[in-house]
Image (cartoon, rainbow, N blue to C red):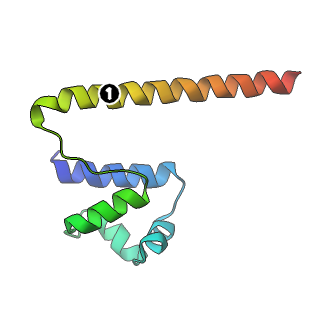
Amino acid sequence: MTDIPKLINAFADTRKARAWSQRELAAKLEMKQSQISDIEAGKRDVRISTFVEIARTLGLELVLVPRRLLPAVQYLLQSGEAASSQNQEETSMYESWKEED
């Protein structure tokens, strides 16, 4: 998979994780839902400024990383995801424990 489809998939995955519809994201970006649909389907060639705007609306940031540092950045991202997942599990366990009291 090339980098552009990976970005598009990341946008769609993040939108879905936030439980936003294409229509909701489009409204926040002052775009039409059909434009979001076309972008996510890879049917629309998007300007860099549009990519940045979509990313920031989704709480993401596009960053250029030297290729030699990419493995380190990917490791940090995976570590952060694992820690976040663990924190969510611990929070859920704590909330369950509180409810038992």
Q: Which residue occupies the extreme right position in the image? A: 101
Does 28 sit above or below residue 81? below
Query: Residue at 89% across / 21% down in the picture?
Result: 101
Q: Residue 27: horizontal and vertical position, in percent? A: 48, 74
Query: Residue at 75% across / 28% down in the picture?
Result: 95
Location of residue 50 (image quadrant): bottom left
Does 72 sit above or below residue 25? above
Does 3 sit above or below residue 67? below
**Label 1 Cα neighbours within 10 Å, binned few <14 / some 14-19 / many ≥20:** few
Which secondary structure, mark 1? helix
Location of residue 55 (image quadrant): bottom left
Q: Which residue is mark 1?
A: 76
Quarter of the figure with the N terminus: top left
Q: Is residue 74 left or right of residue 27?
A: left
Location of residue 22 (image quadrant): bottom left
Identify the amino acid type marked 1: Leu
Residue 41 can be seen, yes or no: no
Q: Residue 63: horizontal and vertical position, in percent? A: 24, 47
Query: Residue at 32% across / 27% down in the picture?
Result: 76
Q: Residue 61: horizontal and vertical position, in percent? A: 33, 50
Residue nearest the viewer, comparing 72 with 45: 72
Q: Residue 2: horizontal and vertical position, in percent? A: 15, 47
Query: Residue at 35% across / 62% down in the picture?
Result: 54
Q: Is residue 92 left or right of residue 84?
A: right
Does 64 sit above or below residue 23? above
